[in-house]
Amino acid sequence: MEKLILLMLLFVSCGSKYKQELQKENILSGTKWECKIADGCINSYKFNSDSSFIFYSCEMEDEYFGNYYLKKDTLFIDQKGSSYDAELPEESTERKLYALVIKDNKLKHLSVSDWIKGKWVKSDFKFDDSYLYKKVNQ
Amino acid sequence: MGCLKLTYNNESMLRVVYNKMTHKPKCEQSFISVDPLADDPDQVDKSPYAFTWNNPINMIDPTGLKPFDWVEKADGTIYWDDNATSKETTKSGETYLGKNVLVGTHNRDAAGNEAVNTAQFDLYLESDKTGPTATIMGNTVPSDITKSGTLAEGLYSAKFGHRNRKKYHNELAIRIYNIDGSDGLPTVNGNPSKANSDLLTGVLFHMGNNYQTSLFDSRGNAYSRGCQTSGCYPNSRPAHNTFMNKVGRNFKGSYYLRAKPEPQTKKSFPITYIANGKVYTLKD
């Protein structure tokens, strides 16, 4: 009986966590987040309801695409490539996995990994902490 | 060099006039004898009478034979050689560069790393034999040398161009090819981005990062995967555009990538040396 109660508790706890993550994802769904890089240059993330995103880089004057998901408090952005890459053979594209944190209603990049020979390799690229993405009303 | 005064009247479309006041004559300049280098391989498609290959803005031709070329001396200085018109006519120990040349002087260390904005690009044009016409600092390495190939030193063919994608059609850049016009350029230590080839394709000299002093954007995306880039710093675009306006949209010539020339050590006299137990002094 005790075992059953424990199992039920575990099930309820997991379900609530799953619900929480879904809620977080729902918070992102349909939102746009912007970061001013320089005068006249604004980068932006746009999260769609189907877990896909579009990132516009004013720096590269390019759009990047891929999927996003949440794991605990970390937002992962699996960037498959850019519209430029879409014209190149797959071996030439640069797939990246970004880890971000949502804090005080701002997105901050924590780390980036590169997809090399079938696995993620963490890059030593250092993010500038001043580049924070703020949620904007659409 | 001669001058024919030409005008027209009602009777004939064109005729030579000498003392006619009714129409202002037009002076047509050209060489009045055939160019002795008319059969030169560079000139087979040109008129043997034409001055500066009909391009007086970009070329000079003081002797009327054919335009001369840039050459690199053994000490690294680049000069306009009145006698060099090809590799064969260039003095021994010197490197023939061509008529219009972009010279990239890299600052790579032994491992192939290069501090950002420490490479130098000098533009040598046929229209300005005092050269260089323009200079800009930049980069000759990719954003990440462990992921992309690094262009090897050497002489390449080059012409004004842009990247293939539509959004780049207005970019001011120079496309770099092998001397024979083919793509697939040699690399220093291979090309990590390609499994089956050590060669780099689609190499250009293009604008660097206009926002940060880095070959990466703020999210770690590469600005260069093997290209040559101008300066990376906030608001670097105007400097790049000024440089490229000097290059001109008609640029067709060479790209020469080289290491920094070694400083020439000057011997200071008198030199004292010992041989066979005796002390000798060289005065000069």
Image (spheres, coloured by chain):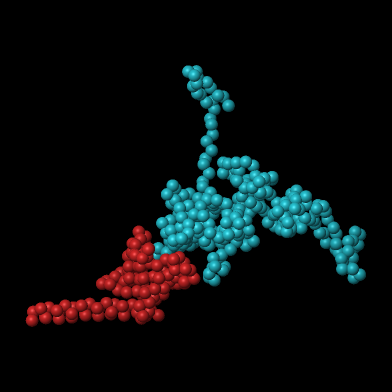
Q: Position of residue A76 (x, y in %)?
A: 33, 71
Chain coloured cyan in this rendering? B
Q: Residue at x 16, y 78 (%)?
A: A10
Compared with A117, A64 (above or below) is: below
- Quarter of the figure with residue B195: bottom left
Q: Position of residue A49 (x, y in %)?
A: 36, 81
The answer to which of B191 and A112 lies nearer the viewer is B191
Q: Where is residue B21 in the image (x, y as percent from the top left)?
A: 90, 63
- Quarter of the figure with residue B269: top right
Q: Residue at x 51, y 24 (%)?
A: B272
The answer to which of B189 and B262 lies nearer the viewer is B189
- Quarter of the figure with residue B270: top right
Q: Which residue is drawn at 85% across and 62% down?
A: B6
Residue B273 seen anywhere in this rendered image of the structure: yes
Q: In which quarter of the image is the N terminus of chain A?
A: bottom left
Q: In which quarter of the image is the C terminus of chain A?
A: bottom left
Q: Which residue is drawn at 37% across and 74% down?
A: A67
Compared with B9, B191 (above or below) is: above
Say left or right for B40 vs A74: right
Residue A55 seen anywhere in this rendered image of the structure: no
Q: Position of residue A84 (x, y in %)?
A: 48, 69
Chain coloured red in this rendering? A
